[in-house]
Amino acid sequence: MTEQTLVLIRGGGDLGSGVAHRLFRAGFQVLICELAQPTVIRRAVSFASAIYEGHILIEGVEGRWIRDFDEAGRAPGEGFIPVLVDPAGQAIRLLRPGVVVDARLAKRRLDTCIADAEIVIGLGPGFVAGQDVHAVVETMRGHDLGRVILEGSAAVNTRIPGLVQGYGRERVLWAPCTGHFVGCAQIGELIHTGQTVALVSGHPVSAGISGVLRGLLHDGLCVQEGQKVGDVDPRGLARHCFSISDKSRAVAGGVLEAILYLQRRLTSTSSYVKVSTGKER
């Protein structure tokens, strides 16, 4: 297995896109599989946005929406990251990637399993390394962020947003009811406490703090009451809204480490088997 091995990433949100960006720049072939209507918040730095816009450029790397599995098989290695609508992960069976990364952040195990590829990696809680996947990468902010776990699980989901300048839950925008979502402000825009930044079926979504609007759902999506629909960055720097986050870079570094470590372990095991059976000396 080499850097030209296909890495299939399930989920093209903030963290999945940071992983895709780093692996692509490191020379890996990358394919992202997403929902038909991705519910990504940080749309400006999520390759999943290509499904809405046709393409997206994130820090010099382009993501393009591709329409079918045949195109998915041809696209990796063409100088951009292909993004395919494939919620069921059919591309795993059809394209047989060498690496699968589950970046959907469901906080619970879905349908990814350790038999999906030679190397399978899960991001955050919901996976058990050595059982569901070969490795787990920690996604909780703190001392262990980005750590590669080869036995056991990531930290349990606390359901409490990470603190940014002392703000946690209050920096997140939540749907006040179930309905259709429409944004009233632009990502990167400076907003103030109490300002209406979106509507859900006519009901206002108001900012809990002042800062820049770092992320917001795409217009037209149907959301559920209490669902996260956006977030505000109290640091007030608009450029942060359009660049990969420190958290995403740390997690991406963990995924790259996990792939290289597991590749080396696979190579060592393969060489040992060949020597011990007399097929290679």
Image (cartoon, helix red, strand yellow):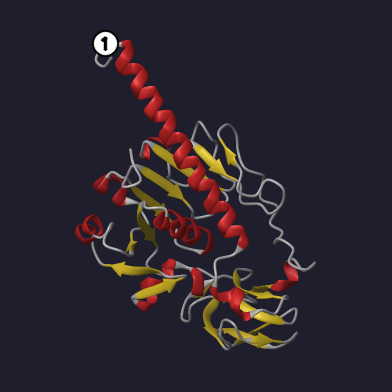
As drawn, is 9 to the left or to the right of 228?
Answer: left
Quarter of the rendering occupied by the C terminus: top left
User: Which residue ends up furthest to the front in the rendered image?
Assistant: 281
Q: Secondary structure at mark 1?
A: loop
Please tell me whether residue 201 is drawn above or below residue 217 in the rendered image: below
Residue 82 position by quadrant: bottom left
Please tell me how crowded label 1 is: few (under 14), some (14-19), or many (20+) other residues with Cα within 10 Å: few
The residue under the point 57% across, 89% down is: 184
The residue that mark 1 highlights is 278
Please tell me whether residue 103 is drawn above or below residue 223 in the rendered image: above
The residue under the point 50% across, 70% down is: 45
Quarter of the rendering occupied by the N terminus: top left
**Is residue 73 among what the camera can see?**
yes
**Residue 53, horizontal then vertical, whole percent:** 37, 78
**Residue 93, horizontal then vertical, whole percent:** 28, 45
The residue under the point 38% across, 76% down is: 52
Q: How many marks?
A: 1
**Residue 214, horizontal then vertical, whole percent:** 61, 76
User: Which residue ends up furthest to the left in the rendered image?
Assistant: 70
Please tell me whether residue 19 is drawn above or below residue 223 in the rendered image: above
As drawn, is 224 to the left or to the right of 117?
Answer: right
Which of these two is toward me, 274 or 68?
274
Residue 58 position by quadrant: bottom left
**Residue 8, horizontal then vertical, whole percent:** 37, 51
Q: Amino acid at mark 1?
A: Gly
Please tell me whether residue 249 is drawn above or below residue 155 in the rendered image: below
**Is residue 133 among what the camera can see?**
no
